[in-house]
Amino acid sequence: MTLAPVIAVVGPSGVGKDSVMQALEARSPGVQRLRRVITRPEGEEGEDFDRVSVERFQQMERDGAFALSWPAHGLFYGVPNAIAQQRQEADAVLVNLSRAVLVRAQEVFGDLIVISLTAKAEVLAQRLSLRGRESAGEQAQRLGRAKAPLPVGLNRVIEVDNSGALEDTVAEILLRLQPESA
């Protein structure tokens, strides 16, 4: 049985990863979004995720509950083993990943497509300010990391600028995900 590819959506804070993923899922019936496990504190929202304590997350790791897990920005993130079942049922599985874990994700999942979202610096700054989750200092740190390069060795990367209309970004991604015609 062939497993569906995993589509990792990556990019700096404020680039619109969650919005793009929701729109891709809505426009493509065979695409499913993976729900991550995160140690995000109560009161901090964002994507649809399973909130757990650090202690519970670490126990889940010890129990082998994750296909992939990593720390980032003071939190822990996990991709549940349920991704294997999703890959049997879907045409593709979308997951929000950190750039630093992409090579490991490619090793774990095999068929990995990376959608690297970018946006103009002023767009990122405005979006971070509007969402109001970070202090001005934290926003400045996130903006400083915005230009961090992707790791070397990734097999398939699709880079798309998400500075403009969401519909345009999604249309470009869907076009570029189509198999190349001979």
Image (cartoon, grey):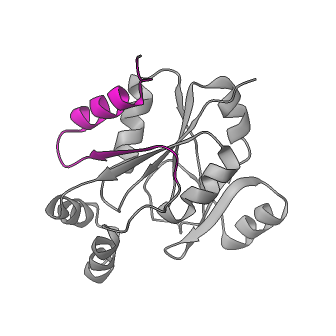
Q: Residue at x 55, y 30 (%)?
A: 92
Which is nearer the eye, 172 or 110? 110
Q: Quadrant of residue 174?
A: top left
Indicate left or right for 34 with 46 as reference.
right
Place of residue 157 in the rendered image (x, y in percent of width and height, measured from the top left):
43, 46
Residue at point 65% right, 43% down?
Answer: 110
Q: Is residue 117 left or right of residue 89?
A: left
Total marks shown come to 0
Q: Position of residue 11 (x, y in %)?
A: 38, 57
Residue that appears at 32% across and 79% down: 141
Q: Quadrant of residue 27?
A: top left
Examine the rendered structure and indicate whether residue 136 appears above or below residue 122.
below
Residue 83, placed above or below residue 148: above
Residue 18 versus residue 160: which sits nearer the camera?
A: 160
Residue extending furthest toward the bottom: 137
Pick out the residue farthest to the top. 182
Task: Work out which quarter of the rendered image holds the C terminus and state it.
Answer: top left
Residue situated in front as seen by the camera: 46 or 124 = 124
Give the position of the N terminus as an image quadrant.
Answer: top right
Seen from the viewer's position, the closer of residues 113 and 91 is 113
On the image, the x and y values in percent for residue 70 come to 62, 66
Does the magenta-highlighted stretch encompass residue 178? Answer: yes
Q: Residue furthest front?
A: 182
Dividing the picture into quadrants, the one containing residue 13 is bottom left
Please give the name of the residue rendered at 55% of the width and 51% of the height, measured from the top-left corner.
49
Magenta run includes residue 112: no
Is 180 situated above or below 82? above
Q: Which residues are magenta?
A: 154-181
